[in-house]
Structures are given as structure tokens and as C-alpha cells.
């Protein structure tokens, strides 16, 4: 059995700072890679959308907006106090 890994060592001055700096560099590299992956994913998603799909989505959104407005106006008319 390797007992060296089980024994407590004295801390080396400055070692914690080196570890922190290394961890910070790793976090920076990971964040850059994740950011680039997200940008690439977004571009691929945009490329998959055809102009017809975009037009259909806009049309559906307009219909949904009109239905919401109608629902609000109906509720407003029904809850209006009578004079």
C-alpha cells in the first residue's frame, strides 16, 4: 500500500494561489467553449428555419394575440358594472 498518499503534508506556500489561478483558467476556457457551442447551436437552429416556417409562426402568433385580446375584452364586458 502506498502510504505517502495517506500522510498529511505540510502546505507549500503559494500552492493555493497556483491552484486558484489554474482553476480560474479552466473555468474561463470552459465558459468560452460553452459560449461558442451555444452560438453554433443558435446558428444551426436559424439555418433550419425556412422562410415559410417563420411566416407561419408569425401568423400563428398574430392569431394567438387576437384571441388573447378577445378574451380580455370579453372578460371586461362581462365584469363591467351595470349602470
Image (cartoon, rainbow, N blue to C red):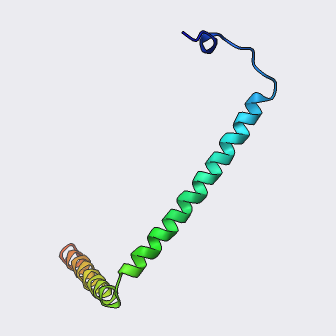
Q: Which residue lies furthest to the front in this view?
A: 1
Q: In this view, does 31 lie to the left or right of 65?
A: right
Q: Who is closer to the viewer here, 71 or 30?
A: 30
For the N terminus, give its image quadrant. Answer: top right
Residue 15 higher or lower than 79, as above or below: above
Residue 35, horizontal then vertical, whole percent: 55, 62
Q: Residue furthest right?
A: 13
- Tell me the quarter of the picture where residue 82 sits: bottom left
Q: Who is closer to the viewer here, 37 or 63?
A: 37
* Picture residue at 26% right of the left edge, 78% below the top: 68
For the C terminus, give its image quadrant. Answer: bottom left
Residue 81, horizontal then vertical, whole percent: 22, 74
* Picture residue at 75% right of the left edge, 35% below the top: 18
Q: Who is closer to the viewer here, 75 or 15?
A: 15
* Picture residue at 30% right of the left edge, 90% below the top: 52
Residue 42, horizontal then vertical, whole percent: 45, 71
Residue 77, horizontal then vertical, whole percent: 21, 79
Q: In this view, does 16 lie to the left or right of 27?
A: right
* Picture residue at 63% right of the left edge, 53% below the top: 29
Amino acid at each position: 500500500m502506498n502510504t505517502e498518499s495517506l500522510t498529511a503534508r505540510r502546505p507549500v506556500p503559494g500552492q493555493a494561489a497556483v491552484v486558484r489561478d489554474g482553476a480560474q483558467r479552466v473555468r474561463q476556457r470552459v465558459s468560452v467553449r460553452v459560449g461558442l457551442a451555444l452560438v453554433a447551436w443558435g446558428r444551426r437552429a436559424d439555418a433550419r428555419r425556412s422562410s415559410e416556417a417563420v411566416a407561419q409562426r408569425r401568423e400563428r402568433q398574430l392569431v394567438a394575440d387576437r384571441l388573447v385580446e378577445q378574451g380580455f375584452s370579453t372578460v371586461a364586458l362581462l365584469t363591467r358594472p351595470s349602470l
